[in-house]
Image (cartoon, rainbow, N blue to C red):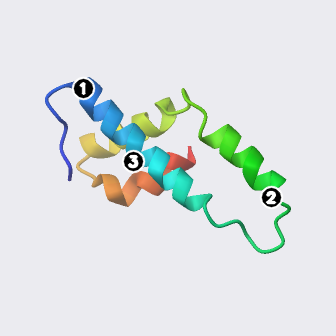
């Protein structure tokens, strides 16, 4: 478990960056036959700033329950 840094702002930024990296990785390789515009629209929607409160809440809940961030990161990013 990564643990919570001294400041909650630091924790939020660390977790937000992890979610952003995961989403960018998942969108890096478009499926075969993708016209490109779909992935472009998904990137625009998913990577827009200000869309991280739900994943952060999921990660905080998992951490509070003793979970490991890496195990719940994909599920958190999905919400």
Spot the residue most to the left: 6
Disc 3 target residue: 18
Disc 1 target residue: 8
Other residues around mark 2 within 10 Å, as few (<14) / some (14–19) / many (≥20) = few
Other residues around mark 3 within 10 Å, as few (<14) / some (14–19) / many (≥20) = some
Q: Position of residue 54 (x, y in %)?
A: 50, 34
- In this rendering, which labeled residue sits more in front, label 2 or label 3? 2
| Label 3 SS | helix
Q: Residue 36 carries which label?
A: 2
Which quarter shows the C terminus?
A: top right
Q: Where is residue 52 in the image (x, y as percent from the top left)?
A: 50, 33
Q: Is residue 63 left or right of residue 45?
A: left
Cα separation between marks 1 and 3: 15 Å
Residue at the image point whose x is 64% and y is 67% from the top: 29
Cα separation between marks 2 and 1: 38 Å
Q: Is residue 39 left or right of residue 63?
A: right
Picture quadrant of residue 59 = top left
Q: Where is residue 57 in the image (x, y as percent from the top left)?
A: 41, 34
């Amino acid at each position: 478990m990564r643990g919570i840094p001294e400041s909650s702002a630091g924790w939020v930024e660390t977790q937000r960056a992890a979610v952003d990296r995961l989403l960018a990785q998942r969108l890096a390789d478009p499926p075969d036959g993708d016209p490109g515009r779909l992935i472009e629209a998904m990137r625009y929607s998913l990577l827009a700033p200000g869309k991280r409160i739900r994943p952060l809440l999921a990660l905080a809940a998992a951490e509070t329950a003793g979970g490991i961030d890496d195990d719940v990161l994909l599920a958190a990013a999905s919400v």
